[in-house]
Image (tube, rainbow, N blue to C red):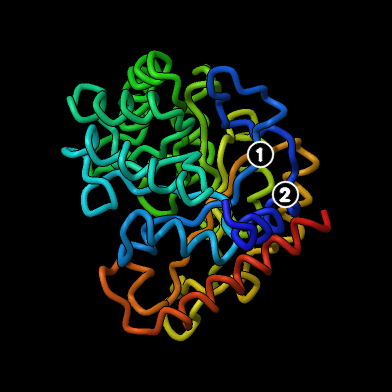
């Protein structure tokens, strides 16, 4: 690895704990003490770059990992996963970065592509995948939807176990199972946290519970195996509307949040998301309407803000 690249990545990694994250599964022959807590960029925001360029660019900014999209419209298409995921991982690792997690649309354990994705990812040593979301349906009892989702997650758990990869279900605000925290716990309570976990999203948690998010965090803490980082504010002109903003510019009390993570003993890989206006990258655009340097400057500013706070916890 080139010295400049190593120094950039080492600087970011030095701000993170060297303890093995809850959701990282050690590769064969790799001691747990050697596992690092990664800070990833969500590859949705780098859809305008190929595998090598994406990894090189993320490395230059200071990330140590890629949260890779393996879903419709993503960097890796599900129907091409057997061929393209090994290629993507090889090129990303060649640039000195890791792929500790992938983001998928998986919700159906009976879909042949589900097994293709999880088998391929497991063989590559990827420890986590984010599945898709189960949705509440008008006219269908909430309890029925949650129990059906639990059944699907239980079946997925068996596939996860077979392939040495854990699910990391995101709490997403809105009419999704898991948005309230309590329903997410009901969906997975009693399942094995080694194979069925939670990708805790502090932005979505605060949208749903501005004051109760610490309760949300605590009840899910045994299952949390990855962490989304993003920020938002409220547009109060007329109907309340959620507006995504750069880190530190909104409602998320990151210092308090990091303190809660520490007090609960939660140590997991991070995935930083950029969902505020960013030249189209916030929507996964294939081309940017801003310059590469403008994108790099803003993304780097968010990374610096977060790692600086984290380093002082």
Crowd around label 2: few <14 · some 14–19 · many ≥20 (10 Å): some
Q: Which mark is residue 16?
A: 2
* Residue at 62% from the left image edge and 76% from the top image edge: 249
* Residue at 79% from the left image edge and 56% from the top image edge: 311
* Residue at 25% from the left image edge and 41% from the top image edge: 84
138 shown above or below 202: above
Residue 263, x across and y down, in percent: 80, 41
210 on left or right of 259: left
Contact between marks 1 and 2 (CB within 8 A): the answer is yes
Element under disc 1: loop
Q: 92 and 112: which one is in front?
A: 92
Can residue 26 be seen?
A: yes
Q: Which mark is residue 287?
A: none
Residue 218, x across and y down, in percent: 68, 38
* Residue at 39% from the left image edge and 41% from the top image edge: 89
140 shown above or below 30: below
Q: How many marks?
A: 2
Q: CA distance from mark 1 to mark 2?
A: 8 Å
Element under disc 2: loop
Can residue 135 be seen?
A: no
Q: Which residue is mark 1?
A: 36
Where residue 164 sits, quadrant-wise, is top left
164 shown above or below 85: above
Residue 86, x across and y down, in percent: 32, 36
The first of marks 1 and 2 along the sequence is 2
Crowd around label 1: few <14 · some 14–19 · many ≥20 (10 Å): many
Where residue 286 sits, quadrant-wise, is bottom left
Where residue 116 sits, quadrant-wise, is top left
């Amino acid at each position: 690895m080139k010295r400049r690249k190593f120094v950039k990545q080492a600087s970011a990694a030095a701000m993170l704990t060297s303890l093995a994250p809850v959701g990282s599964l050690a590769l064969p022959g790799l001691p747990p003490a050697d596992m690092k807590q990664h800070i990833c960029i969500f590859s949705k925001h780098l859809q305008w770059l190929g595998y090598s360029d994406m990894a090189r660019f993320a490395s230059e900014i200071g990330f140590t990992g890629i949260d890779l999209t393996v879903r419709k419209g993503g960097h890796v298409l599900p129907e091409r996963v057997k061929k393209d995921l090994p290629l993507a991982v090889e090129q990303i690792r060649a640039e000195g970065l890791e792929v500790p997690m992938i983001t998928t649309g998986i919700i159906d354990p009976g879909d042949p592509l589900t097994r293709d994705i999880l088998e391929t990812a497991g063989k590559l040593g990827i420890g986590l995948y984010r599945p898709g979301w189960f949705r509440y349906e008008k006219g269908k009892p909430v309890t029925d939807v949650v129990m059906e989702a639990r059944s699907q997650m239980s079946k997925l758990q068996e596939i996860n176990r077979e392939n040495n990869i854990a699910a990391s279900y995101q709490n997403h605000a809105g009419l999704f199972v898991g948005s309230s925290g309590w329903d997410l716990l009901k969906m997975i309570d009693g399942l094995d946290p080694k194979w069925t976990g939670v990708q805790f999203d502090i932005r979505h948690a605060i949208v749903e519970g501005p004051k109760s998010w610490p309760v949300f965090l605590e009840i899910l803490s045994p299952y949390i195996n990855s962490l989304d980082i993003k920020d938002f504010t409220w547009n109060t002109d007329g109907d309340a509307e959620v507006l995504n903003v750069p880190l530190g510019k909104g409602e998320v009390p990151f210092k308090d949040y990091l303190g809660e993570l520490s007090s609960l003993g939660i140590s997991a890989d991070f995935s930083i998301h950029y969902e505020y206006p960013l030249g189209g990258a916030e929507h996964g655009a294939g081309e940017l309407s801003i310059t590469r340097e403008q994108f790099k400057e803003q993304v780097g500013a968010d990374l610096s803000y977060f790692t600086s706070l984290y380093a002082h916890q």
